[in-house]
Amino acid sequence: MENMTEIFTVLLLPDVANVTNGTKAQHRDEELYDIFDAPAVPKAVEALMYIMYIVISVAAIGGNVIVCYIVFAYQRMRSVTNFFIVNLAVGDILMASLCIPFGFVSNLLLQYWPFGAVMCVVVSYAQAVSVFISAYTLVAISFDRYIAILYPLRPRMTKLQAKLIIVLVWFVALLTPLPTAIMSKLEQPQDWIDRNLTDRYTCMEAWESNTQRYHYSMALMILQYFFPLAVLIYTYTRIAIVVWGKRTPGEAQDARDQRMAASKRKMVKMMIVCVFVFTLCWLPFNSLMVVGDQYPELYNLPNIIYLWFACHWLAMSHACYNPAIYCWMNEKYRHGFKMVFRWLPCVDVVSRSRSTTMNVSMATAVSMKMTTRIDASDNNVNRAWSQPRNSIMSFHMHVACQFIEW
């Protein structure tokens, strides 16, 4: 897939060519400079674009930094799923700190690449890496949920295994788009050289042929979008069938089963929303890239620049949505955000304490009921356990809290 500056250059070059082919040679330089000095869009629309890009960049960096802080500041938040969520946040921070501002300045403000050859490679590569991190971290979370719900008797993923999977995700994310880093270079379109614009460059992937460019673009798009999306659709469809469409024997017969089932549904709902938002944000831009690679004349259409900006902004805005989803759909993250913003007069952190007290009380009741079940099911069960009764109760208390808190 071409990087952002390269696509924007394609959108500009038809205008440059029209100026070059004009009949009045004495006005060519003036007209060409007008292309760069004058805004490509009306000032009101341009100002709106400035605001839209600045908002998503600030929201993405701020929101995802807070997510990382919540997980590492509170011991009870350091779970397997939350480690994956932190990895998602790191990928979004990478996107928001490098790709959004540099792409915004070069594409919209300046319409050429002013940051040098090193940043050309870094920004183009970082964008591909961050998308891979988001996609494959979502896949890792889906597999964790898939095994936990479809095969509940299997051992759960440990924190060490989760960290190893995160390392693997980064390895794949760094290795797969390496051609982007190798091929990204500063170039000058011939029309710019002819007009003596020797101080302005574009950041482009310098492939030997359009066929190589097309094949690499399609391979990258399949690996970073369509393949992960297919896996996510499969895993969450199977999970949804089990969680909502089928009742296991004895399920939802008492408070314990109801709370455990509700906890599973809450977590699955939240991750399905994350997957849906990822799909919705990146689908228009990826579709535009596929069509543009197949039919380059698309970029000659009038007002195509507005469609490109809309698709690009939607794709970049994905970096700021996940923290809002966590705050909306998860009580623990919501409380974490409230603690961060507790200095605001409109933020209430008392309700969480009450809710926590209620949950602990419910967990105590559930654990006592579970212990009673053990005694009732087998008169010899106390002789089979060497631990005292309070150890058994503590174990059940821990299990109940695990489900209630998520």
Image: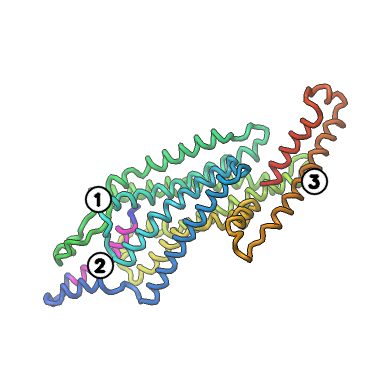
> Which amino acid lies under the numbered mark 1 shown in the image of this protein?
Ala
Residue at numbered disc 3? 255
259 left or right of 346 in image: right
Mark 1 nearby-residue class (10 Å; few <14, some 14–19, many ≥20): some
Q: Count the marks.
A: 3
Q: CA distance from mark 1 to mark 3?
A: 63 Å
Q: Quadrant of residue 381?
A: top right
**Residue extending furthest toward the front:** 343
**Residue at position x 44%, y 60% from top?**
57
- Judged by depth in the image, the label closer to the viewer, 3 or 2, is 3
Residue at numbered disc 1? 206
Mark 2 nearby-residue class (10 Å; few <14, some 14–19, many ≥20): some
SS class of the residue under badge 3?
helix
Magenta run includes residue 6: yes
Q: CA distance from mark 1 to mark 2?
A: 20 Å
**Residue at position x 25%, y 49% from top?**
207
Figure check: 19 above or below 206: below
> Which amino acid lies under the numbered mark 3 shown in the image of this protein?
Ala
Instruction: Say if residue 290 shows up in the picture.
Output: no
Measured from the top left, where is residue 199 in percent x and y? Answer: 19, 61
Q: Magenta part of the protein: which range?
A: 4-19
Instruction: Say if residue 204 shows up in the picture.
Output: yes
- Judged by depth in the image, the label closer to the viewer, 1 or 2, is 1
Residue at numbered disc 2? 14
